Image: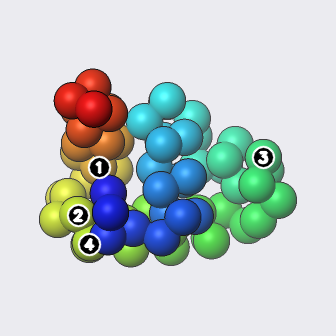
C-alpha cells in the first residue's frame, strides 16, 4: 500500500469495505471513470489481477497491522 497515492489508498479502502465504484465516485464527487482509473493504477502497482484481489490484499494487510 505504500506505493499507492493517498487517493488510490482511499479508493481501495472503500472498495475493501464493499463499496461499489459508482457509489465511491458519488461520495468523492468525481466521475466513475476517475475511480476506474485509480483502481486500475492501484492494481498495477500492487500486482493484483482483479479488484477483488486488490481489496482482499488491503483487508489482509490491515489485519496484520
Q: Does dot 3 land on a helix, a strand or a loop?
A: helix
Expressed as whole percent of the image width and height from the top left, the position of residue 6 reads 54, 64
Above or below residue 16? Residue 3 is below
* Residue sitting at the far front: 65
What residue would you read off at disc 2? 46
Above or below residue 28? Residue 13 is above
Above or below residue 64? Residue 40 is below
Q: Crowdedness of circle 3 by 10 Å Cα count: few (<14), some, many (20+)?
A: few
Disc sitting over residue 5 in the figure: none
Expressed as whole percent of the image width and height from the top left, the position of residue 2 reads 32, 63
Tell which of 20 and 43 is nearer to you: 43
Q: How many marks?
A: 4
Contact (Cβ within 8 Å) of mark 2 with mark 4: yes
Tell which of 27 and 2 is nearer to you: 2
What residue would you read off at disc 3? 27
Find residue 41 and report its image quarter: bottom left
Contact (Cβ within 8 Å) of mark 1 with mark 2: yes
Q: Is residue 39 left or right of residue 21?
A: left
Q: Is residue 48 left or right of residue 40?
A: left
Q: Does dot 4 land on a helix, a strand or a loop?
A: helix
Q: Residue at x 47, y 56 (%)?
A: 9
Q: Does dot 1 land on a helix, a strand or a loop?
A: helix
Amino acid at each position: 500500500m505504500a506505493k499507492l497515492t493517498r487517493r488510490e489508498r482511499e479508493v481501495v479502502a472503500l472498495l475493501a469495505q464493499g463499496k461499489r465504484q459508482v457509489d465511491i465516485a458519488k461520495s468523492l464527487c468525481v466521475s466513475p471513470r476517475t475511480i476506474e482509473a485509480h483502481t486500475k493504477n492501484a492494481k498495477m502497482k500492487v500486482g493484483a489481477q482483479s479488484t477483488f484481489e486488490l481489496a482482499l490484499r488491503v483487508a489482509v494487510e490491515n489485519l496484520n497491522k
